[in-house]
Amino acid sequence: MKALLQTLEASSEESAAGAGARTGRPRLSLELLEWFGGIGEFCVRLVKAALRPPYEFKELLRQMDEVGAKSLPLVALAGAAIGVVLSLHLRDSMAQFGAKSMLPELIILSLIKESGPIITALVVSGRVGAGIGAELGSMKVTEQIDAIEASAVNPYNFLAATRVLACALMLPLLTIVADVCGIITGWIANALAEPMSLKLFLNLGLKDAGFSDLLPSTLKTVVFGFIIGVIGCYQGMRAKGGTAGVGRASTSAVVLASLFVILADVVLVRLIITFFPQ
């Protein structure tokens, strides 16, 4: 009798766990759809607020300094490291095929077409995305955003639009800095192994490159900046739950922004290949 009761209890626990799993999956899908719907509505309100005066130029300049100037050392360091890594890795591979003369071209093209833009976007996503999520999240949980709205100031214009626009404008400039630093350190690493002047390195690397290689890859970072700004602002402005909610908003802003930057890169590369064939 005791064994029978234990069996019934175990089967009821298993059925409850199965029911929980079944109800968990639709709930997760519903939360996912709710998140996409919320961020879509947020983008609509953001665009409407940005196009409607007054225009917050002073706040925009402050955010451009926050996103651009303060991210510059980190982006330059990341670009320089990528240049050295590309030079070290590709040298042995190209030597195996007897194509060491193509090393400068391969380093420069890989930097300006893919490595520079994506590394810059991920670095800025980690620094700026977390900062925006934490800053707006703390303002939300302390009701500062409600106070701004009560003062007849549109928080979507003053807080969100300026940060999103600053990210979109600064990403291409930061990408160019990362490309230049990567090219210089790639030349230094290459020159230490096989002496070569910077002029010869650039001539060999840019002989088959054109603006169709540089411009689309650099301008796609405008989309990356928009994604970072929108997700950071959205996660911050919907934060709740005190200091723990601020931490969750900051973490989710970094994770989601990095994920969507990578997914957007896949789509944009396909579009660039389609509209700018080699």
Image (spheres, grey):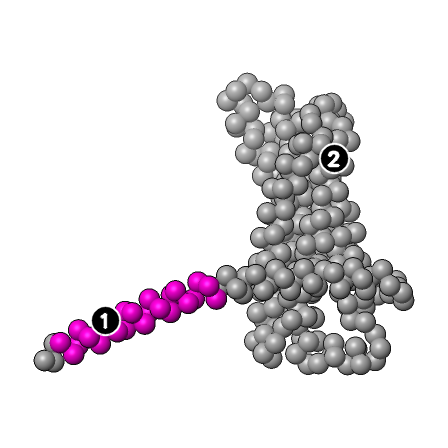
Mark linked to residue 276 = none
Point 16% across, 79% down: residue: 5
Part of the protein shown in magenta: 4-27
Place of residue 124 in the rendered image (x, y in percent of width and height, measured from the top left): 67, 54
Mark linked to residue 214 = 2
Point 17% across, 73% down: residue: 7
Q: Nearer the viewer, mark 1 or mark 2?
A: 1
Q: Nearer the viewer, residue 123 or 182?
A: 123
Instruction: Determine the secondary structure under disc 1.
Output: helix
Q: Is residue 126 above or below residue 134?
A: above
Amino acid type, residue under disc 1 in the picture: Ser
Place of residue 96 in the rendered image (x, y in percent of width and height, measured from the top left): 50, 22
Q: Is residue 78 visible?
A: no
Point 58% across, 71% down: residue: 247
Place of residue 113 in the rendered image (x, y in percent of width and height, measured from the top left): 67, 36
Q: Is residue 254 above or below residue 174?
A: below
Q: Is residue 122 above or below residue 111?
A: below
Closer to the N terminus: mark 1 or mark 2?
A: 1
Amino acid type, residue under disc 2 in the picture: Leu
Q: Nearer the viewer, residue 142 or 123?
A: 142
Q: Residue furthest top?
A: 98
Q: Residue at label 1?
A: 11
50 with respect to 259 (left or right): right
Instruction: Determine the secondary structure under disc 2.
Output: helix
Check if residue 141 falls in the magenta segment. no
